[in-house]
Amino acid sequence: MKIKHRLAIFNALTRFAVVLILWWLLPILIERVVYKHINASLISKKESFIKHLDKEEINDYIIKKDSSETFASFTTLHDEFLQLSRLPFKQVTESTRFITEPRLIEGEQNDYRILEHRFTYDRQAYLLEIGSSLSEIKDLTIAIRVFFLVVLFVTISVTFAADTLYIEYLLKPFYRIIDTKIRKVDQPETFDHTPIHSTSADFRALDEGLNQMMSRISDLFAKEKQFIANVSHELLTPIALLKSKFENLLQNDSLDDDAIDKIAASLKTLDRLKKIISNLLLISRIENNQYQLNEEVDCHEIATNLTQELEDRIQARGLTLSNELKYKYKFKGNHTLFQILLYNLLINAVKYNRENGSIILSDQMNQDEYLLKVTDTGIGMTQEQIENVFKRFSRQNKDQEGYGLGLAIVDSIAHFQNIAIKVTSETNKGTVFMLTFKRSI
C-alpha cells in the first residue's frame, strides 16, 4: 500500500475515533448542559411560587384534593407539573434537591427532572415538587446521535478523498525522485542529476543527498570498471609472451618427456587463463557500453548458422538439435553480442545434456513480445542453482569443463540489449532458457 493511502486512512481513522468518542459522550454532555438549564428554570419557578405563596393560597391548593392533602397541576402536554403536599411534620429544615425519576400523570408515564423543596410555612411542613419532562430531551439526543452518524460518514468520505489528493500533491516530488532517480536507473552513468523541484525542504534534502551519493558511486563504479578493463587487457600481453616462450621451449630436442608434459600443462593453464581474462574483458566492455546497438539482428539467421557450426560437436555427444523457429524476427541491437549470447546458451545445453539427449530451438510471438526458447533434456538444476546460474564463476557441475563465465556473459549481453531472460529447470529432466524481446523493428 502506498504511503499516501496509509496517511489518508490514518487521518480517516483518527477522525472516526474522535467523532465516535463524541457520539458516545453526547448523551452525557447533553445531560449536563440540559440539566443545568432545567435546574435553573425549576429554581426560578420555585422562587416565584414561594414568593407569592400565602395561607389562603395554600388552603386553596390543598382543599382541592382533601383526601390526599396534595395539590397537583400540570400542563396539557404533560411536559411540566407542580405538586404541593402537606407533610406530617410541624417543622422541617428548608432544603432543595434535584432528582430524575419517572412519574405517572393521568395514566401517562414519563421521565421528569424534579425539584424537591421542603419548607415550613405557618408552623406546617410542606413539600413542593416542580417537574419538567425529559422526553423531548431523549428524542433530541437520539436525533443528534443519528445526525452525528451521518456527519461521521460524510466527513470520513470527503476528508479521505481530500487527504488523498492533498497528500498525493505533497508526495509528487517523492514519487518523481523514485521514478527518475531510482527505479529507472540501471547504471550509475544513467543517473539523472537534475534537481527535482519541490516546495518541501525534506524532499530537496533527499534529492541533494541522492545526487551526492550517486556521484560518489558513479566515480567509484567507473574507476572499478576501468581498473578491471586495464588489468584484463594488460594481463593478455605477459600471457602471450609466456605462451610464446613455452612454445619455443617445446622445439628444444634436449627436453625429456617429463619436461614436455609440464610445459604442455603450463600452456594449457595459460590458455585457460587467457580465456578467463578475455571473457572478463568482454563483460567489462559490455558493462561500459563500449558496443553499439545500431545493427539489424536476425534471430533466425544467427540460430541457423550456429546449429550448422555446432553440428560436429552435437553429433559427437550423440545429441539431436531441432531448429523449430517459425518467425524471422529482427531487432535493433548488436549482431556479434547476440551471436555470443545464443552460442553460450547452446554450448551450455550441449555441455550439461545427457547422452543421446536433445536440444530444441523454438519461438513464439505474443502481441508485442517475441519469445525465443532453448530447451534441453539435460541434468537440470535445483532452485538454488537457478538463483546462482548467472553469477560469475558459478558452475552447475564441477566435473564439467568450464570457467563459470558463459552464463554471466549471457546475462550481461541480455541486460545490455534489453532482452529479458528467464530460466526454468527440473532436476534430471532438463532446462529451458527463455529470451523475451520487448522491442521489434
Image (cartoon, helix red, strand yellow):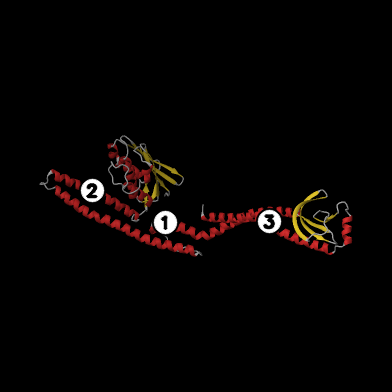
Query: Secondary structure beneath disc 1?
Result: loop
Residue that label 3 marks? 28
- The answer to whether the residues at label 2 and label 1 have Cβ atoms under 8 Å apart is no
Give amino acid for label 3: Ile
Which element type, helix, strand or loop, lies under badge 3?
A: helix
On the image, numbered disc 2 is attached to which residue? 271
Image: 156 above or below 299: below
Q: Earlier in the sequence, mark 3 or mark 1?
A: 3
Q: Which mark is residue 185?
A: 1
Q: Secondary structure at mark 2?
A: helix
Q: For the residues marked 3 and 1, what is the alpha-carbon distance in whole angstroms?
A: 60 Å
Q: Quadrant of residue 21?
A: bottom right
Across and down, in percent, residue 78 comes to: 81, 53
- Give the mark nearest the N terminus, 2 or 1: 1
Ranked by sequence position, the earlier of labels 3 and 2 is 3
The residue at 48%/59% (across/down) is 176
Residue 166 visible in this rendered orientation of the protein: yes
* Residue 339 seen anywhere in this rendered image of the structure: no
- The image quadrant of residue 117 is bottom right
